[in-house]
Amino acid sequence: MSDTLPPIIEARGLRKRYGASEVVCGVDFHVAPGECFGLLGPNGAGKTTTIRMITCFSPPSAGELTVFGLPVTQHRTIKARLGLAPQEENLDPDLSVEMNLVIYASYFGIPRAEARARVRELLAFAALSEKAGARIATLSGGMKRRLILARALINRPELLVLDEPTTGLDPQARHLVWERLRDLKRRGVAMLLTTHYMEEAAQLCDRLVVMDHGRIVTEGAPDALVVRHVGHDVLEVVTDGNPLRRAQVAARVRPFGGTVEAFAGGVLVYSRNGADVPGMLGALAGERVVRRPATLEDVFLTLTGRELRE
Amino acid sequence: MTDLLVGAFRVWRRDMESWRRYYRASLVGALGEPILSLLAIGYGLGRFVTLGGVSYAEFLAPGILASAAMNAASFEATFGAYTRMAEQKTYDAILSTPIGVPELVAGDVLWAASKSLLSGTAVLAVATVAGLVRSPWALVLPAVSLLIGIVFGAMGMVVASRAKAYDVFTYYFTLVITVMYLFGGVFFPIESLPPWARLVAWTMPLTHAVAIVRACMAGTVDWTLVPHLAVLVVMILAAYLVAVRAVSRRLIV
């Protein structure tokens, strides 16, 4: 990305403390103009708190945070140039689909006639033109997400902040949202995205960070992160949870030098470069083995562990 | 100041727009109750009572007007504002735009007061038709209703911004609003209270509101109303500042 332009978001040593517990513990990152930047991590990693600080909903406890080069205390100026699609659905249930957008436009001081034109355009963009007069309660989950996205675009933002934009959507609805986000990216809108779907991050993000327990554990482009942390191929060996068999399988592949990891149902073998895969497969002859390319999900689980987070 | 009013107007317009969906039911509630009270108590009970030479209905009408304004704003600023703040997350949506907490609170207080304007004006119309209005000063009563609405709108917002659930409002309405309604000079002159109770009554904003409305209807407007107005203005400023602070603490964390 263009490193010559000043960053859209810059965080240095950013911290957030609630009483005795620190939920964001000194993070550094930046988002360049036109870039799609991902914020990944398990529940409680500090993603939403980081987003709340960027969108001026939560004053940082320490560190520096600028958006458009402005400190986050200048919230009116920042919010005029920013679009926020929150995780929690907060559409106005008392207003129709169309009036949700018209009224939201008025908060930015966009004149009525101009607002009406933008609303028409955005409803088409979000594939909601048919629903202009509908009540919010009658919309499906996918329609609500699209309306929230359309609402976030009403002020033609330079930065779009998306907190789990496709959580709870079916694959069709999710692909439609992705397509729209790619459209926006082509138009040069910078994006900050949090998601639990690794495929979503791999599809959309130019660069991402993985956060855990309030810290950044890795940073880079999705492909580069896969190569750096897990390598090329993954072999999943199914051992039906028998710990003895698991240990035997691990012993057989360990000489090939890849990372070997046990999980409840078997063993995962990460191949660094792909060249050692035939040898590994030979050593595992007779076992039930699935070979697949390494993904961002492997990176995520390798870095943040397999324990449940609630 | 201009920014505050412009922002507040935008929030007010949102409330107005959403009200259009259910205004009929809302009108019946807001206008029906005070008008029925005036008729039932004023004429029903009033036939047995006269107070200082005026009919009971004439004594009661200003109190009903002021308390109708109080109730309309109180309901809107507690149940209504709390729903937008805590249940529907409308406040979060508004605060992700250039609208800040001061404009948001001012807009919702003005909206609550607009409902008082409506209720107060309706009671005034009925009182006028019933021949209970003695002075052209009554023409300022819609504005007075709005002022009363701002007082109780701001007070209601203080309660709503600290509420954890709807049941808090039951306490507020029983212990604060109903006490004012019964002892604030609506049904009987507060001069008939013992001296200590009279002092307590003068700490209640409704007592001052009733005094102003009564003077306007009876045509006894003079400089003695200035302290009453001053109390209401001070209450508005204090409650507004507390509400802004409490809403900020609740939502900007």
Image (tube, grey):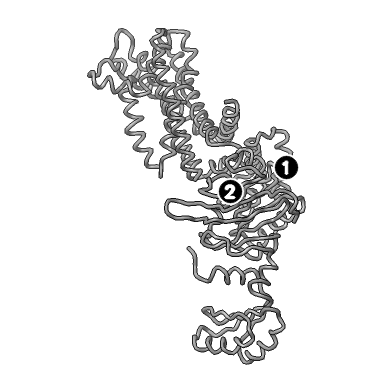
Q: Quadrant of the N terminus of chain B?
A: top right
Q: Nearer the viewer, residue A303 or A150?
A: A303
Query: Could you say where residue B46 lies in the image, as x and y percent from the top left?
Result: 32, 16
User: How many neighbours does mark 1 have within 10 angstroms: few (below 14), some (14-19), or many (20 or more)?
Assistant: some
The answer to whether residue B22 is left or right of residue B178 is right
Q: Nearer the viewer, residue B124 or A69?
A: A69
* Quarter location, residue B220: top left
Could you tell me which secondary element the residue under label 1 belongs to? helix
Query: Could you say where residue A140 lies in the image, as x and y percent from the top left?
Result: 61, 54
Chain for numbered disc 1: A
Mark 1 and mark 2: Cα distance apart in space: 39 Å
Disc 2 marks which residue?
A64
Residue type at the position of mark 2: Glu
Can I make out residue A18 in this image? Answer: yes
User: How many neighbours does mark 2 have within 10 angstroms: few (below 14), some (14-19), or many (20 or more)?
Assistant: some
Q: Is residue A60 above or below residue B169?
A: below
Can I make out residue A127 in this image? Answer: no
* Quarter location, residue A228: bottom right
Q: Nearer the viewer, residue B182 or A236?
A: A236
Residue drawn at 46 percent across, 18 percent down? B144
The answer to whether residue A238 is left or right of residue B141 is right
Residue drawn at 55 percent across, 34 percent down? B15
Chain for numbered disc 2: A
Residue type at the position of mark 1: Arg
Figure label count: 2
Q: Which mark is residue A120?
A: 1
Q: Which mark is residue B227?
A: none
The answer to whether residue B1 is left or right of residue A187 is left
